[in-house]
Image (cartoon, rainbow, N blue to C red):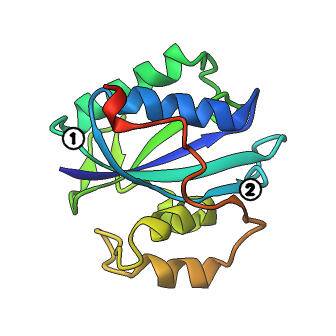
């Protein structure tokens, strides 16, 4: 299955945290592409500091729930402990899109429920595939991004910023 995962970090060495997450992700998924790296202000009511955000396109045999559990394990292994909804975090990994599937299993909603409201998720996804559409509404993600605007999103590094990660390290 082709899956798009959103990555974010706003504590510690943010770039290193994102690289470490990609490295661990490669243990159960083939990472086809990684977006440019962006900085975004925290979305209210989340407190500062600013986030670094990216997205990756992976191929995995893990089902949605197994993938979610794997992502939560990565977050835990990288030091994420807070369970508060808007707390700053060392790493945040979200399943943005899982093929064209729509999932609502209580603890897992795909596509991500706030996908259409977040430039810091939409732009990295569009870096990976400019033709993506929202599985529920059928709208092009580019149209959703145009509607909400950049919301302070700034590209800080082009695609390739994660050069310390390689699939062959498996």
Estimate the x, y position of residue 149 in percent, counting from the top left: 67, 78
SS at badge 2 = strand
Out of 33 and 148, give the one closest to the viewer.
33
Identify which residue is drawn at 62% across, 50% down: 53
Estimate the x, y position of residue 35 in percent, counting from the top left: 51, 58
Estimate the x, y position of residue 18 in percent, counting from the top left: 58, 36
Q: Is residue 31 visible?
A: yes
Query: Residue tagged by mark 2?
Result: 40
Marks 2 & 1, CB-CB < 8 Å contact: no
Out of 147 and 75, give the one closest to the viewer.
75
Estimate the x, y position of residue 71 in percent, counting from the top left: 40, 29
Identify which residue is drawn at 75% across, 65% down: 154
Query: Residue tagged by mark 1?
Result: 60
Please tell me how crowded label 1 is: few (under 14), some (14-19), or many (20+) other residues with Cα within 10 Å.
some
Identify which residue is drawn at 60% across, 49% down: 161
Q: Is residue 86 visible?
A: no
Identify which residue is drawn at 15% across, 38% down: 61
Please tell me how crowded label 2 is: few (under 14), some (14-19), or many (20+) other residues with Cα within 10 Å.
many
SS at badge 1 = loop
* Res 140 → quadrant: bottom left
* Image quadrant in which the C terminus is located: top left
């Amino acid at each position: 299955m082709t899956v798009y995962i959103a990555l974010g970090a706003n504590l510690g060495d943010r770039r290193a945290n994102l690289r470490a997450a990609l490295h661990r992700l490669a243990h159960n998924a083939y990472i086809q592409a990684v977006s440019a790296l962006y900085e975004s202000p925290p979305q209210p009511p989340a407190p500062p500091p600013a986030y670094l955000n990216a997205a990756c396109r992976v191929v995995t045999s893990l089902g949605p729930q197994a993938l979610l559990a794997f992502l939560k394990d990565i977050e835990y292994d990288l030091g994420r402990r807070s369970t508060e909804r808007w707390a700053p975090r060392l790493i945040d990994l979200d399943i943005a899109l899982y093929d064209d599937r729509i999932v609502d299993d209580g603890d897992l909603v795909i596509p991500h429920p706030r996908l259409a409201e977040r430039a810091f998720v939409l732009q990295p996804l569009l870096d990976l595939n400019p033709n993506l559409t929202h599985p529920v509404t059928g709208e092009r993600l580019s149209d959703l991004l145009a509607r909400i605007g950049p919301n302070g999103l700034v590209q800080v590094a082009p695609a390739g910023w994660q050069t310390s990660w390689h699939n062959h390290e498996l």
